[in-house]
Image: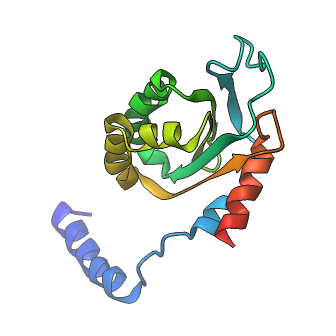
């Protein structure tokens, strides 16, 4: 087929696709969250309340604040999102009041998760509204399909929550 003929044939198909095919809808947060993250990989907790193996050095103080986030990216956006989130991933450890942080990701679902533990909400808010985190949120959201977060004051457990626990919390908030 001659290049001009191939171009002409393709040009006849393109308008039909644009006019007849409905635009692809973005998945909802609930649909993204329903993905089976059985390939989830985790980084052990790090921070002042944890040793080099990710084990608590002492029970967490009561109360303390737990915050969790999850975001989903398209495969072609992974590197761009990682570039935007690298700075706050390191910056979080410089904040007074951080007890610990852990990170996880699923290649199959294109998800990245965090759990951070804080002495109190004032310490958490200083990080959240700080320059590094704010810039990452502003610049990183364009690389995601969706994002959700929640936090709560933990008054009973003196250990960090399990990943399944924070998933349930996010699901409860979403309902």
Q: Which of the 4 quarters of the picture holds residue 16?
A: bottom left
Location of residue 106 with respect to 8 vertically, above or below: above
Q: Which of the 4 quarters of the picture holds residue 63?
A: top right
Give the x, y percent position of residue 99.
63, 27
Image quadrant where one finds the N terminus: bottom left
Q: Which of the 4 quarters of the picture holds residue 134?
A: top left
Work out whether residue 35 can be spotted: no
Location of residue 24 with respect to 130 vertically, above or below: below
Work out whether residue 132 can be spotted: yes
Given residues 107 and 46, the one toward you in this image is: 46
Given residues 93 and 81, the one toward you in this image is: 93
Give the x, y percent position of residue 5.
21, 70
Give the x, y percent position of residue 73.
49, 51
Given residues 138 and 159, the one toward you in this image is: 159
Determine the residue positioned at 73% across, 57% down.
Answer: 169
Q: Is residue 129 left or right of residue 162?
A: left
Q: Is residue 73 left or right of residue 136?
A: right
Residue extending furthest bottom?
20
Image quadrant where one finds the C terminus: bottom right
Determine the residue positioned at 65% across, 42% down.
Answer: 65
Determine the residue positioned at 74% across, 13% down.
Answer: 53
Tag count in the figure?
A: 0
The colour scheme used to paint the residues is rainbow
Give the x, y percent position of residue 42.
69, 31
Given residues 166 and 99, the one toward you in this image is: 99
Q: Is residue 68 left or right of residue 84?
A: right
Residue extending furthest left?
4
């Amino acid at each position: 087929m001659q290049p001009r003929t191939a171009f002409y044939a393709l040009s006849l198909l393109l308008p039909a696709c644009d006019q007849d095919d409905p635009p692809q809808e973005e998945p909802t947060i609930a649909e993204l969250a329903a993905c089976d993250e059985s390939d989830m990989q985790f980084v052990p907790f790090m921070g002042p309340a944890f040793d080099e193996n990710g084990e608590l050095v002492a029970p967490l103080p009561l109360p303390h604040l737990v915050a969790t986030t999850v975001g989903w990216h398209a495969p072609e956006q992974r590197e761009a999102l990682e570039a935007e989130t690298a700075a706050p991933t390191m910056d979080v450890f410089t904040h007074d009041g951080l007890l610990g942080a852990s990170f996880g990701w699923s290649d199959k679902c294109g998800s990245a998760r965090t759990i951070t533990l804080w002495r109190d909400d004032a310490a958490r808010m200083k990080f959240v509204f700080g320059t590094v985190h704010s810039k990452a949120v502003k610049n990183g959201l364009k690389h995601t399909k969706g994002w959700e977060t929640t936090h709560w004051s933990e008054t009973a457990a003196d250990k960090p929550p399990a990943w399944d626990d924070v998933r349930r919390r996010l699901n409860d908030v979403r309902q």
